[in-house]
């Protein structure tokens, strides 16, 4: 990791003139044990420890207990349950169906979003200024809309009776889509949810990737063209390799976000998703707060975080490797 | 980029595709506006029209007059203001520590700050609920405010760190040489130069806190919700009153959309810091 490490420890080329001032001299030099940084970070550390680290630990503990509503009211310590919660979940076919559904949704929605985002980013390079501006403005509005609101908009557009989508499809000769319910069949319902997530996700991807594309050195592309490369070859051999770190980062982020899908399902299913619409996030929530089975919900959350851990570690490693994290 | 080597038809085709894409993306946004300005008879019509034939503000009036709208609007503003201000103060100090000092545990702190942004906050909701319940902070604005503060803190630290790191150290050193003590350096040199960064960061914090609704919906009763939770409640309560619902959605989303458009560049940069520079 060449970019990381304090400047003081990274060997630089010795300055030719001895009197040249050292660059980026850390404050540390003046006193060996400086408490200032810890003092500065202390309030943040206390808050993060109290409201993130502690709940995280509490969640793990809770997943080994059997907490019911009465413990919540009485404040008494729930009895230990050992691995019972985990056994119950991991042997439950319903849970595995949820995991599968969440995984399939994540793979499909991320693949579609990233490919579409990349295509739009490339398209933005080829259109005229005015068209590019129109694309950016339209995407910024989509990006800005809160998840809950965009989910409500989609719910309204696919409304069985008065939705615009049914009305438009109904215009096709020989197709009867009047009063068609999009959520009766889970496959169709998930198509709506995926469309919503992709629609909302493409602006971030396209705008970020377009920004990355404009950084690709023009000389390289010109040289390739002079050497007889076709547009496609230049794209594959020059543009995409340069863009790769950025693609990796945005894909990782999309995986993390989409794997945690909650809001969109929650809204389009009126805060009580049916079995076929449960994702890991809604499932844990429903177990805990719908059925007052806090320990089971906690165990599901623990498993969810464990499933995500690999992807998260990958993201952080990338940030350290690529970025000026130092 | 390579347009000089492509035919005119290619350009026309690309432009057409671009326009179609922009229109398709924008359509849902247009449709919510269209619906909100239609009278009920036009909203609940089997022949939906592309624009309101008799535009009206009735839906907005009905949304504002709905139960708890004004209360929840006020709650949302209070909670958000507290969370953003708190995160800004606490976050600035921590960012200063990370950007300007080398200390034991610094790298670990960076990792924690990056990692907690990825942990789905929702999964912490169960223990958080139990904690706040025991502290008698459920159904109160205080409990939610502190929770939101912590929710936006990692991003705040991370972004401010970037802004502070961009200020040349030579400026601090010059100030120290000229007789400033270290605290004076912080608030005379670094704080003013971080100004735009503080604005951008606080706006993003505002957006995050304003958009949250699950935590507050779980912790609090209807009279202690924010506008986003109110909107969800309204959807469930009202059945097919789509006009007022869409009007409520516009009112709720408006501040976020406006703020977002102002700071959009910073958000993208914060999430992918340095990735483009290779």
Image (cartoon, rainbow, N blue to C red):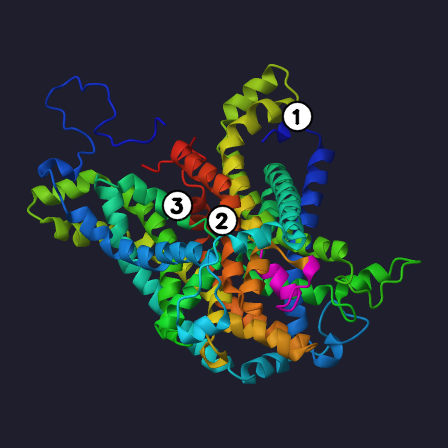
Q: Compared with residue A326, is residue A98 higher up or lower down, i.e. above or below? A: below
Check the residue under mark 1 and report the chain it is in.
A
Check the residue under mark 2 and report the chain it is in.
A
Q: Is residue A178 magenta?
A: no
Label 2, residues with CA under 10 Å away: few <14, some 14-19, many ≥20: some
Please check whether the numbered discs 1 and 3 fall on a single chain: no
Camera-side residue of A278 and B195: A278
Location of residue A267 in the rendering, given as x and y in whole percent from the top left corner: 62, 65
Q: Which residue is mark 1?
A: A232
**Secondary structure of the residue carrying numbered label 3:** helix
Q: Residue at x 53, y 58 (%)?
A: A144
Q: Which residue is mark 3?
A: B114
Q: CA distance from mark 1 to mark 3?
A: 37 Å
Drawn side of residue B93 relative to residue A212, left or right: left
Q: CA distance from mark 2 to mark 1?
A: 40 Å
**Residue A308: numbered disc:** none
**Residue A305: numbered disc:** 2
Range drawn in magenta: A261-276
Q: Residue at x 55, y 55 (%)?
A: A143
Check the residue under mark 3 and report the chain it is in.
B
**Secondary structure of the residue carrying numbered label 1:** helix
């Amino acid at each position: 990791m060449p970019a990381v490490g304090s400047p003081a420890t990274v060997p630089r080329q010795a300055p030719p003139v001895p009197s040249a001032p050292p660059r980026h001299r850390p404050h540390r030099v003046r006193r060996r044990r400086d408490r200032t940084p810890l003092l500065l970070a202390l309030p943040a550390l206390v808050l993060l420890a109290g409201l993130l680290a502690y709940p995280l630990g509490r969640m793990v503990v809770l997943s080994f207990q059997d907490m019911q509503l009465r413990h919540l009211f009485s404040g008494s310590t729930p009895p230990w349950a050992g691995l019972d919660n985990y056994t119950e979940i991991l042997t439950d076919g319903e849970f595995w169906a949820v995991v599968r559904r969440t995984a399939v949704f994540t793979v499909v929605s991320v693949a579609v979003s990233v490919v579409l985002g990349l295509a739009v980013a490339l398209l933005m390079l080829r259109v005229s200024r005015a068209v590019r501006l129109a694309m950016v403005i339209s995407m910024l509005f989509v990006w800005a809309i809160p998840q809950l609101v965009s989910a409500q908009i989609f719910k309204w557009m696919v409304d069985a009776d008065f939705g615009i989508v049914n009305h438009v499809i109904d215009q096709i000769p020989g197709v009867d889509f009047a009063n068609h319910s999009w959520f009766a069949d889970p496959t169709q319902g998930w198509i709506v949810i995926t469309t919503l997530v992709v629609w909302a996700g493409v602006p971030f991807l396209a705008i970020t990737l377009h920004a990355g594309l404009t950084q690709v050195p023009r000389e390289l592309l010109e040289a390739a063209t002079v050497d007889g490369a076709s547009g496609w070859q230049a794209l594959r051999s020059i543009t995409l390799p340069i863009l790769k770190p950025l693609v990796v980062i945005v894909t990782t982020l999309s995986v993390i976000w989409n794997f945690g899908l909650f809001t969109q399902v929650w809204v389009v299913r009126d805060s009580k998703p049916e079995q076929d619409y449960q994702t890991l996030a809604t499932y844990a929530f429903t177990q805990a707060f719908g059925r007052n089975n806090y320990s089971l919900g906690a165990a599901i959350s623990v498993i969810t975080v464990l499933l995500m851990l690999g992807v998260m570690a990958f993201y952080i490693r990338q940030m350290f490797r690529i970025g000026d994290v130092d | 980029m390579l347009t000089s080597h492509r035919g005119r038809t290619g350009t026309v085709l690309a432009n057409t595709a671009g326009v179609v894409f922009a229109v398709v993306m924008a359509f849902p946004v247009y449709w919510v506006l269209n619906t909100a300005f239609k009278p009920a008879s036009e909203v609940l019509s089997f022949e939906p029209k592309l624009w309101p034939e008799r535009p009206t503000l009735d839906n907005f009036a009905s949304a504002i007059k709905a139960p708890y709208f004004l209360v929840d609007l006020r709650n949302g503003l209070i909670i958000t203001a507290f969370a953003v201000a708190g995160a800004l103060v606490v976050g600035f100090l921590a960012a200063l520590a990370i950007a300007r000092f080398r200390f034991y545990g610094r790298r670990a702190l960076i990792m924690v700050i990056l990692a907690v942004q990825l942990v789905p906050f929702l999964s912490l909701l169960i223990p958080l609920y139990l904690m706040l319940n025991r502290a008698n902070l459920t159904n109160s604005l205080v409990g939610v405010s502190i929770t939101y503060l912590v929710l936006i803190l990692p991003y705040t630290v991370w972004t401010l760190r970037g802004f502070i790191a961009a200020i040349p150290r030579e400026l601090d050193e010059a100030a120290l040489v000229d007789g400033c003590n270290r605290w004076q350096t912080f608030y005379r040199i670094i704080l003013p130069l971080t100004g735009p960064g503080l604005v951008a960061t606080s706006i993003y914090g505002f957006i995050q806190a304003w958009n949250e609704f699950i935590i507050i919906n779980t912790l609090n009763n209807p009279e202690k919700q924010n506008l986003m939770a109110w909107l969800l409640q309204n959807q469930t309560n009202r059945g097919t009153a789509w006009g007022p619902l869409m009007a409520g959605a516009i009112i709720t989303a408006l501040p976020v959309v406006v703020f977002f458009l102002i700071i959009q560049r910073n958000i993208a940069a914060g999430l992918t810091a340095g990735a483009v520079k290779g």
